[in-house]
Amino acid sequence: MQNQVPCFSSLVKQLALATAALLLVCLHPLCAQGPSVVSDNFELNDSHFHLTNYIQQGTDIHDFLKIMGTKVGRVALFGIPLQQQWSYQNSGDFAPTYYLQSDSPLYYYSFTDAYIAMAYRSLPPAQQARIDPMITGFNPADMYAADHIRRVLQTFPGVFTGIGEFTIHKEFVSSKISGETASLTNPALDRLLDFAAEVGLVVLIHNDVDVPFPKEGAEPVYLDQMKALLKRHPNVPIIWAHCGVGRVIHPIKGHAAMLESILSDPALKHVYFDISWDEVAKYIVSTPETLRVSADLINRYPDRFLFGTDEVAPASQEKYLRVYYQYEPLWKALSPETSAKVRKENYERLFDEGRRRVRAWEAANAKQHDSQ
Ligand SMILES: [Zn+2]
């Protein structure tokens, strides 16, 4: 049924009022900093999304905005810093698109940051407001990594909110990267996190808490190093991707207790976890017991978990949101307040603050691009 058509002059009047309201809103000084989107009508925000894959190909950002549609309000968006080399010596005419498809190395592909920045800049302001681009194209084993991040911020001011997802320990991947292997104890990592603190960047780090196929009952190999690193950088909001779970790093017995040892530590109150990745979702919803333990932990620390998809270059909304739907039992098991925080509000709090601080740093550290 169609509503009665209102008369033309009342339409014009309504339109004029709406335009005036819009003008008033946009004259507000906050508008100049890239307004936060009122996402009340959206179901979720995504704190972990790869626009491109291991050979730097992916979804066109304009298509991606359509895929977000009316469901996803905001997205922390990045490429993948590592490029899989196509070595003719190794795979001949077979062109690998994933790191498991070739024995040849991965290397840091810094141009990803320029690519992401230009993609973001091609969007109209209202769509830009829904995206938080992240810098990833640096080698965390390089003392100069912090300088790369500074250069990206000064070359593309007004774009980025944080850094990551970058990786320290990840099964199969770490050992495939050319050059020195990244480590949680490398001062290069401290230098870049010190810089993140100075700027106010949100940090998203991938670090498997353990090696593949660990010995039953043994302490996760990288837990102590990770805690020490986190404690050395109390002024940076750090999101630990996938709650530390890796592909063949099955959640250790007592994974929830391990997470709680971090969540309950006042020296680690700047640490957050994302529950992105279908492998994590699979584990959380696998039995009534895992679901109960997970929901109980998240309900007790509702401000410390963020939803993310960890999708790579999806072609449709259905593919993009499969992890979100996989979590249906979890959304039901959480209290409504906790569910809203994990799906949306924690993202807004962290990334709004990140945007505000990074824009302020950029304004204070603007670089003149003159021809001297
Ligand atoms: Zn990821």
Image (tube, rainbow, N blue to C red):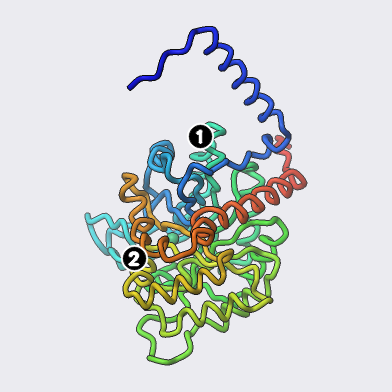
Nearer mark to the viewer, of 1 and 2: 1
Residue 148 visible to the viewer: no
Q: Nearer the viewer, residue 353 or 93?
A: 353
Q: Quadrant of the C terminus?
A: top right
Circle number at residue 161: none
Q: Position of residue 143 (x, y in %)?
A: 63, 67
Does ligand 1 reach within 8 Å of label 1's beta carbon?
no
In the rendered view, tell whether residue 270 sits above or below residue 47: below
Residue type at the position of mark 1: Leu
Q: Quarter-wise, where is residue 156 in the image? A: top right
Q: Of the residues shown, which amino acid type is indicated by label 2?
A: Ser
Q: Position of residue 3 (x, y in %)?
A: 40, 19
Position in image of residue 340 (x %, y %): 51, 56
Residue that label 2 marks = 104
Secondary structure of the residue carrying numbered label 1? loop
Q: Residue 34, can we see it? A: yes
Q: Nearer the viewer, residue 336 or 307?
A: 336
Which numbered disc, 1 or 2, marks the residue that appears first in the sequence?
Answer: 2
**Residue 123 bears which disc, if any?**
1
Residue 317's quadrant in the figure?
top left
The residue positioned farthest toward the right in the image shown? 364
Q: Within the displayed image, which quadrant is ligand 1 positioned in?
A: bottom left
| Mark 1–mark 2 distance (CA, rounded to whole Å) | 36 Å
Residue at 66%, 46% (x, y): give it. Answer: 154
Q: Nearer the viewer, residue 11 or 161?
A: 11
Going 45% across and 58% down the picture, which residue do you hit?
Answer: 308
Q: Residue at x 65, y 57 (%)?
A: 147
Asked if residue 182 lies left or right of residue 192, the reply is left
Mark 1 crowdedness (10 Å alpha carbons): few <14, some 14-19, many ≥20: some
